[in-house]
Image (tube, coloured by chain):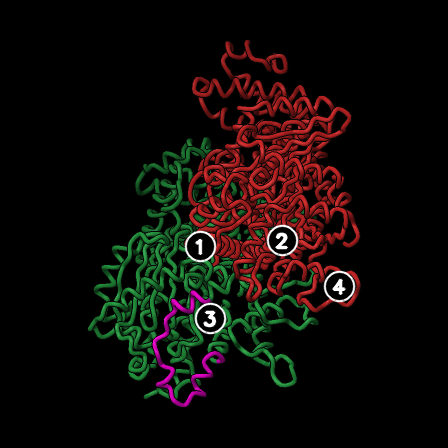
Chain colours: A green, B red
Amino acid sequence: MNQLCLFSSGLELANLLVTSDLLQCSWEAISEIHKQTSTTPHVSYKVYENRPNGTIIAFASSNQDTLSLVQTLGRDLVSSEELKGVFDLFGFVGTNVNPSFSVHKEAVNVFSFLLNELTLLKAQYGNSSPLIITGHSLGGSIASLFTLWLLDGMPPNATKRPLCITFGSPLLGDKSFQQAVSERPTWNSSFLHVVSSQDPFPQLLIAPYNSVAAGSTSQTRLYEPFGTFLLCAESGCACFEEPESTLELLKAMGSKFVRNQNPQNILCFTDYRVILENLKHKSICKEISQLDGSIMDPLLAGIILQLKSIGVETQGDGGVLNSLTTNTVASAKKFLIRKRNVFDPSKKLNDRKVDMAYLEWYKKVAEDEGGYYDSYKNGQSGSRDDIRSREEIIKRHRILTQYWKKIVSEVQKMPQEVGVSLRRRWLYSGTNYRRMVEPLDIADYYRKGHKDYITQGRSGHYILLEQWFNEAKPFQVVSERNKACSLIEDSCFWAHVEEAIISCDILNDGQSSPEDQRSSKENLNRFENCVMDMIKNYEVSPEIFLPQSSFMKWWRMYSIIARKSVGSSPLIDFMKKDYRNYA
Amino acid sequence: MVGEKVGDITGLSEELILKSCKLAIKAHEKFPGKLYIYEKNRGSTDVVFAFAGSWLVDHWYSRKPFGETKVDASKFPSLRSLGSDEIALVNEAFSTRFEQLLIKSSFASEVEKAVSDRKQVVFTGHSSGGPMAILAAIWFLEKYVRPNIYQMPPYSVTFGSPLVGNRIFSHALRRENWARYFINFVMRHDIVPRIMLAPISSTEQGLKLMHDFTSPKSQSFQHVPIGNSAAAPAFFLSVMRNASSVASHAACNPMGWTNLLLETVSCFIEISPYRPFGTYIFCIGNGKLVVLDNPDAVLPLLFYCLQLSPGEENAEFLHGIFKEHLVYESELKESLNMQNVVYIKNLIDIPLSSDAGTNYAAATVNSALNDLGLSTRARLCLRAAGELEKQKLENQKRVDSNQDTIWEGLRRVQEYQTNCEIRKIGYYDAFRNQRDANDFNANVKRLELAGIWDEIMEMIKKYELPDGFEGRKEWIELGTIFRRLVEPLDIANYYRHLKNEDTGPYMVKARPKRYRYTQRWREQAEMRSIGSSSESTFWAEVEELRTKPYSEVKDKVLRLEGQAFAWIRDGILGKDVLLDESTFTKWWRALPVQHKSGSCIASYLGN
């Protein structure tokens, strides 16, 4: 692999956003709420249907007095544990990897206050498309929460997702919250946060800015941005996605508020219309800032331009790049490389098909020895060739198991909705693998003299693969079979056979307790009915009827018992003659 | 690359370019009486057809917002992507004008005449005459050059032409190796080549202004009423803003931007689908020319080299911008004489800052970039376009290195086929039965080959290989051999495992890309109709037919027999399908006697 040449396109994305009218339309919708003087205490909203860009739902703080908002806004986080049982609505954000998280308490309070109305809103507009959800200051936080709520109900591969655009909103949650949202790339990509360097409000929940803070706690340090940020300054704008450097840049932009001793002077309402117009105008003009002629690395050049655009210093003493710049470049690099190396099991899937071919061949060859299950279980090794082929099978078996265990564990780590789509894609191969390979594990298990494979010995990844297969069934078109399948559908079939043989042994053993006898009998009855159903549906492969197979061994034991007790049953009839024609 | 001449780079003499330019401008005068003019010169070895432009809004946009439509596949069968089978988009108004030209004028017969006189044909157009020239050249390539009726490819030379087609359009022309016949001259400040990047809503007024400005009969000929109208600056600004959107949107891909927000946002905003293609020659205005042929680089340049410097946004500048559309002839006379040409081929090493440049070559490139007024941001876009191209070439190299492995694998499958035939069994049936170790080994080979090909198909689907890849002879040939030899094994495997029972017929649900794509490669390369080269799926057809009663599928049986007859006759389908024990033979022999006696393949299977 040659050296990767990385670029940062934060300027291009920012430019695309400001030259489209998307942001302006959203802000206009918010401004219309601002015009109405409302007496409701927190946040009010308005729906605009069929605007040029789609339906817009706008949230705005009713109180436009920034100063009083700044002074009254609570800064505490509330954790998902504390919310449990009180206001569980956002529990779905947690994932296996990030089970607990914290969000801005005030935002959740306002949301729960509006819950009834928001529920109606969700029912009415949740499925409209295209849909923009926008909000200003605290209204932006509500817009974000509302969007998350909508996203939760959508399939991960939905092509028409809502877009959430916030203006000058405070940060919403902690690092785990950020990570949990980022685990779902499609969720994270639905959020755009517009922040102006002139707007003090977004700075509220960022650590160094607490000069006005009343009752701020150490928790305020824990807020972390999620989604994409469009940072705007007089001189230009740029987009940032990597959370940590975004946080640092927000701090750098906000540092002037800290320096200013008299916050009242600057805490005026920020009108994003003016800001956006300025940026739109600037978009067709050349940037003035010049780059040092010696810089040839495009990522470095791109980041420097981005920082200069948002009015952040890139040089420290003596004209060298300051640590903010070098850190931003380093984390951008790490971020981009990580994204390029996302887990993709499909890369090796074709190799695994070769492994499966080896097992399939083994299965075929073993038909002469009573089927691959019994052949493997008995482990007969006559000639040297047999030993070699057995070693080959053990090797392939191991490789396949490692591969699928890894896939299952990766998928398990993913949030439910992301995993589901992946599972559907690998379902076919995964099912095939389970049906082909699990019998070998069962054979190993019973050869060692163990019992109760299904409850005691079954590997978790088989259980999950089967569970996922069953979950996906309703989405699959399955036509009725009229021929026997080549792999037994129930991958635990042989474990059932082994248990049935054990049950026969118990019945035949005069010294076993009556209780054991009864349960064995029940077990056998159940198994008999099961087998007959499977045969009717062509769900078992013809090889189970090979004379040396464990199934036939069971049948020889069971038929004696059954004839004594019942005399006739569908299976007894079937096994008299018809099974020879089963195919 | 410095010091080359325009004639050497384009393959078209300076003299012919100037002649084209002159005619292209002249063509406007005869409009609307004549849609085109051409120069007949008995002694000359070339014929130049020049198309008139028009400023009627209907001649630019057929509908809101951008007026694009699918190309007419019957006239332009090559204008699609082969892998994903996507048909290219063309500006409908331009393509309708071209259709009219074919129907209502003697254009086609005059071209025919030029061909029979063995002339070099050049199509040219200024302004919206440009799209006519471009479409005429593609039409000519499809009609004469592709079927090898005429070997001398035409040229399309445009001056200040608006854009005509989308990304697929450009991709297809590059795949066919035709892009080099399209030469587009663009004055650095000419607004017209950028117009199609904006929707009709923001250019309608501007088109009227341009009409008044350029028509000699109009009062405001060569005079923009900027003082008393806000329309001109509004037109310029909105075209530029849209161009800026398109450039930024397009730049995100070569930059490898993985932010999915872009995808989400794209559903909410309208972005022009039009993209440049061919060779672009930017005229800087001081006689210098800058040449580029990477479409990913040309697109951002269309925006960036017209980007305003501080203080430039004034009436005089705007007037200049309108005027630049009319100066091609005089400008080219000067610059083609001067031959101060910079051909920027290597985009990877271009300096990012205007004051860079230590050695001679870098300094020359840098001075060209400065002449175009390119900021660092613009240069980053060019670098990204260059890196993308380089990455594609490296991918191609990697893919090419698999060829030997593929040939070796195919040789093994071929051996398998021969061995089976010796045993009087077709390899399809042998493989379907999977009786001995040879069958198993063939299966492993099949899977190994599938792994290699699937990876290539994935790259094609994502456009990660050079546009020309699917037009390369060696790969088309390899793909065809692979498909004919190995696809029967995939079909055998499919029906052996009864996958049709739960998934449905192979052809409908399960045919892998590695066969679908490679079939289209061959059909395109050999000018066959779509679906005609389906010999490798013969067995899938047989498998489906043999499970159904004859009366239900009579027509299909007849069709398959017809095809099979030709395939076997031409040696495309192996004779092993006719062996006594073949599934096909057995099925066919069980067909009703009446049918068999009249069947075209009875002679193969008669007894």
- 2 vs 4, front mark: 2
What amino acid type should be assigned to the residue bearing mark 2?
A: Arg
Bin the neighbour count of mark 2 within 10 Å (Cα to Cα): few under 14, some 14-19, many 20 and up.
many
Q: Residue at x 56, y 63 (%)?
A: B312
Q: Is residue B209 left or right of residue A111?
A: right
What amino acid type should be assigned to the residue bearing mark 4?
A: Ala
In the image, the segment drawn in magenta is A252-278
For the residues labelled 2 and 3, the Cα–Cα distance comes to 31 Å
Residue B567 in which image quadrant? top right
Disc number at residue B228? 1
For the residues labelled 3 and 4, the Cα–Cα distance comes to 35 Å
Using the rendered image, report if marks 4 and 1 lie on a common chain. Answer: yes
Disc number at residue B363? 4
Question: Which quadrant of the rendered structure holds the N terminus of chain B?
Answer: bottom right
Residue B525, position as x, y percentages in the image: 65, 32
Cβ atoms at labels 2 and 3 below 8 Å apart: no
SS under mark 3: strand
For the residues labelled 3 and 1, the Cα–Cα distance comes to 35 Å
Question: Which quadrant of the rendered structure holds the C terminus of chain B?
Answer: top right
For the residues labelled 1 and 2, the Cα–Cα distance comes to 26 Å
Chain holding disc 2: B
What residue would you read off at disc 2?
A: B188
Residue A398, position as x, y percentages in the image: 58, 57
Disc number at residue A232? 3
- 2 vs 3, front mark: 2
Cβ atoms at labels 2 and 4 below 8 Å apart: no
Is A547 a magenta residue? no
Chain holding disc 1: B
Q: Is residue A398 left or right of residue B261?
A: right
Q: Nearer the viewer, residue B473 or A249?
A: A249
Residue B421 position (above or below residue B187): above
